[in-house]
Image: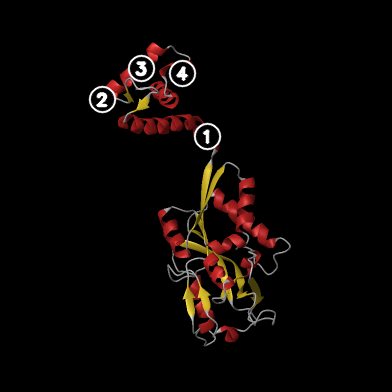
């Protein structure tokens, strides 16, 4: 069976008429009917109900139509995919935690695409711990996370220590009172994320309180940053978020500084220890250039 046989069958099934299908295919009707008969003989089943007007598919015909269309679409896409494969010289898979999207990651990816247009770049959102597993398996080439971990096979570079802000409902009594102390927040319902896997950014937030001998009295665990901010907007509680999240303007949520500059969350780039590919070299250079540019004070260059 050839692709042209599938096209003949799809034409008849679509038009529900042998004559119109033959005209569309620019062939005469008798050869078309013979081709359909050959297909039915090969598959061992009737595909059309004989004698019906318009032509109707049998149950086997409906199944065959779905498969035929899928194969024809794949055949039509093959030249385009091949041309794309020829022009793709390399690939780079980036794992990231969601909050890094509000920082410099999108800018770095745009600059990388511009500098290396023939590299296939893909991004996969995953926790820092999942990034570690993905680096080991080769599923990603680089990860951007927030959790420090020890692994002799992974190179970690702290790109920056990002200060945390307090996300408050816009009608909260503490709004507009200036930088806040953690001691002022310890009795507030605290929303942390992600719930799992642990350890995670949630543990960084809880550790910030514990480092000052404080124990939040009411902790709500959720999975996503957006969910945490939604609960804040609803007045369910407050949240500590990286400063870059302030770019995410959300109604009924305000962001307020902490008075303690040591309450931070790192942004960490992780790669396989021996991986010095041209793609990673380019990526590191772009990040270093971004952090060295005006407007990013206090951000150390990559070393």
Residue at mark 1: 86
Residue at mark 2: 44
Rendering colour mode: secondary structure
Given this view, does label 2 or label 4 mark the residue nearer the observer? 4
Pointer 1 or 4: first along the chain: 4
Query: Could you tell me residue 108's position as x and y percent?
Result: 62, 55
- Relative to 147, residue 15 above or below: above
Q: Secondary structure at mark 1?
A: helix
**What residue is shown at x 61% (from left), y 55% (from top)?**
106
- Relative to 217, residue 123 above or below: above
Q: Secondary structure at mark 2?
A: loop
Query: Could you tell me residue 91's position as x and y percent?
Result: 52, 46
Question: Is residue 253 in sight in this rendering?
Answer: yes
**What residue is shown at x 53% (from left), y 70% (from top)?**
228
Few, some or many residues within 10 Å of mark 1 (<14, 14–19, 20+): few
**What residue is shown at x 55% (from left), y 36% (from top)?**
87
Pointer 2 or 3: first along the chain: 3
Residue at mark 4: 20
Task: Give the side of residue 8 with respect to residue 104, left or right.
Answer: left
- Relative to 14, residue 231 above or below: below
Few, some or many residues within 10 Å of mark 2 (<14, 14–19, 20+): few
Q: Nearer the viewer, residue 269 or 100?
A: 100
Given this view, does label 1 or label 2 mark the residue nearer the observer? 2
Residue at mark 3: 35
Structural distance between the alpha carbons of marks 1 and 2: 40 Å
């Amino acid at each position: 069976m050839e692709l042209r046989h599938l096209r003949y069958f799809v034409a008849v099934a679509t038009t529900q008429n042998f004559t119109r299908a033959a005209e569309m295919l620019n062939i005469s009707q008798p050869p078309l009917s013979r081709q359909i008969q050959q297909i039915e003989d090969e598959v061992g089943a009737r595909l059309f109900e004989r004698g019906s007007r318009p032509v109707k598919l049998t149950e086997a015909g409906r199944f065959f139509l779905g498969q035929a269309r899928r194969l024809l679409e794949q055949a039509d896409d093959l030249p385009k995919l091949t041309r794309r494969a020829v022009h793709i010289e390399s690939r780079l898979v980036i794992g990231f935690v969601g909050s890094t999207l509000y920082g410099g990651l999108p800018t770095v990816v745009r600059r990388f695409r511009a500098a290396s247009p023939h590299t296939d770049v893909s991004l996969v959102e995953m926790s820092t711990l999942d990034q570690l597993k993905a680096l080991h398996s080769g599923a990603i080439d680089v990860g951007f996370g927030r959790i420090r971990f020890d692994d002799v096979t992974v190179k970690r570079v702290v790109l920056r220590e990002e200060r945390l802000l307090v996300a408050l409902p816009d009608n909260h009594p503490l709004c507009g009172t200036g930088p806040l102390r953690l001691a002022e927040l310890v009795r507030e319902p605290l929303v942390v994320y992600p719930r799992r896997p642990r350890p995670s950014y949630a543990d960084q937030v809880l550790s910030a309180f514990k480092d000052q001998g404080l124990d939040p009295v009411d902790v709500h665990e959720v999975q996503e940053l957006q969910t945490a901010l939604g609960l804040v907007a609803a007045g369910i509680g407050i949240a500590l978020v990286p400063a870059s999240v302030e770019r995410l303007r959300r109604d009924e949520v305000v962001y307020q500084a902490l008075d303690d500059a040591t309450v931070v969350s790192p942004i960490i780039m992780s790669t396989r220890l021996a991986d010095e590919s041209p793609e990673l070299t380019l990526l590191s250079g772009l990040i270093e250039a971004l952090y060295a540019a005006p407007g990013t004070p206090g951000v150390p260059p990559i070393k």
